[in-house]
Image: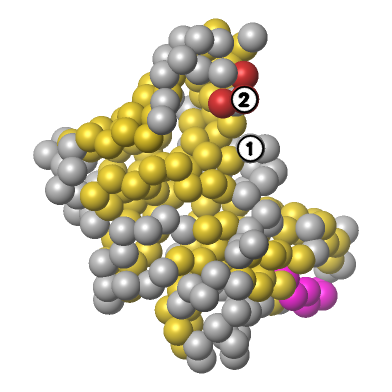
């Protein structure tokens, strides 16, 4: 079963609106990361939040982490057409001394002009 | 500029053929990873390596093999034992610390198709 599950699977909003994507996970984590992927391209690292942090900002991105609920959310404010992409959360686990990233299925975000 | 280079961008494999995907990085990262992505899906870990001459199986290693003879290079071979190899393959690297708070850097991927 997936460590990270994202909700919704797809999201379509108007330009200028805020977009919120959620991620839930099952086991304890070292940190949680969000990535963006344009169709058929590389994943790009957006933001990392450590397990002892609750909120983090980067430009128009705001990430929250609730370790008691094992969930995170990514908020993109004032969305733009260029924000159209798939967004993935990834949980960092320490397994046998090595850090491994486990990815969710992603949320496909469409920003309509 | 530092980064990860994957080649080729597109690759076609005949049934029963082995093919090798290249991944090279000049970021001086210790750790490298191979992921597979199927359409509309997340990424699944195939193999990873924390240091030269050492690598570990990920969640879906069957039908794949890797080598790590140089720090910069982590090639992936898709063998004929992999029954459903058509997918998008992504290579990544990272600073490898016991507890790393850095993200991964990804290559632009290789799209493999069985013909």
Colour setting: secondary structure
> Residue at coordinates 24% horizontally, 50% vertically from top-left?
A50
State which region is magenta.
B16-21
Task: Name the residue located 59 percent from the left edge and 87 percent from the top edge.
Answer: B70
Asked if residue B104 is positioned above or below residue B73 in the image, the reply reads above
Query: Which of the numbered marks, if any, corresponds to residue A18?
Result: none
Label 2 environment density (alpha carbons within 10 Å; few <14, some 14–19, many ≥20)? few
Q: Residues within 10 Å of mark 1 (few under 14, many from 20)?
A: some
As drawn, the label of residue A82 is 2
Q: Are marks 1 and 2 on the same chain?
A: yes
- Does the rendering let one see residue A63? yes
Q: Is residue B74 left or right of residue A104?
A: right
Classify the position of the C terminus of chain B by image quarter: bottom right
Q: Position of residue B78 (x, y in %)?
A: 69, 72
Q: Nearer the viewer, residue A30 or B46?
A: A30
SS for callout 2: helix
- Count of residue discs: 2
Q: Quadrant of the N terminus of chain B?
A: bottom right
User: Which residue position holds label 1?
Assistant: A38
Q: CA distance from mark 1 to mark 2?
A: 10 Å
| Horizontal arrangement in the rendering, residue B86 relative to residue A51 (left or right) | right
Residue A91 is situated, as x and y percent measured from the top left of the image, at: 33, 51
Residue B68 vs B80, above or below: the answer is: below
Q: Say left or right for A5 vs B81.
A: left
In the displayed structure, would residue A11 be above or below residue A63? above
- Residue depicted at x 18% and y 37%: A54
Residue B40 image offset from top left, x and y in percent: 60, 38
Report in which chain the residue with disc 1 lies.
Answer: A
SS for dot 1: loop
How far across and how far down the image is residue B44, in percent? 50, 57
């Amino acid at each position: 079963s997936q460590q990270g599950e994202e909700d919704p699977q797809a999201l379509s909003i108007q330009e200028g609106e805020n977009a919120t994507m959620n991620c839930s996970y099952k086991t304890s984590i070292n940190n949680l990361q969000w990535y963006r992927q344009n169709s058929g391209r590389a994943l790009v690292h957006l933001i990392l939040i450590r397990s002892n942090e609750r909120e983090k900002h980067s430009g128009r991105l705001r990430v929250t982490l609730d370790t008691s609920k094992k969930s995170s959310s990514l908020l993109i404010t004032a969305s733009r057409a260029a924000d159209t992409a798939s967004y993935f959360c990834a949980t960092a686990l320490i397994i046998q001394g090595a850090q491994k990233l486990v990815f969710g299925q992603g949320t496909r975000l469409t920003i309509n002009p | 500029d530092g980064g990860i280079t994957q080649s080729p961008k597109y690759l076609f494999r005949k049934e029963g053929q082995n093919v090798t995907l290249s991944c090279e990085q000049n970021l001086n990262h210790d750790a490298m990873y191979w992921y597979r992505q199927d359409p509309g899906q997340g990424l699944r870990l195939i193999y990873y390596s924390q240091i030269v001459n050492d690598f570990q199986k990920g969640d879906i290693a069957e039908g794949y093999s890797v080598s790590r003879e140089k720090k910069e290079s982590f090639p992936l071979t898709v063998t004929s034992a992999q029954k459903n190899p058509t997918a998008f393959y992504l290579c990544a690297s990272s600073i490898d610390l016991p507890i790393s708070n850095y993200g991964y850097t990804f290559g632009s991927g290789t799209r493999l198709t069985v013909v």
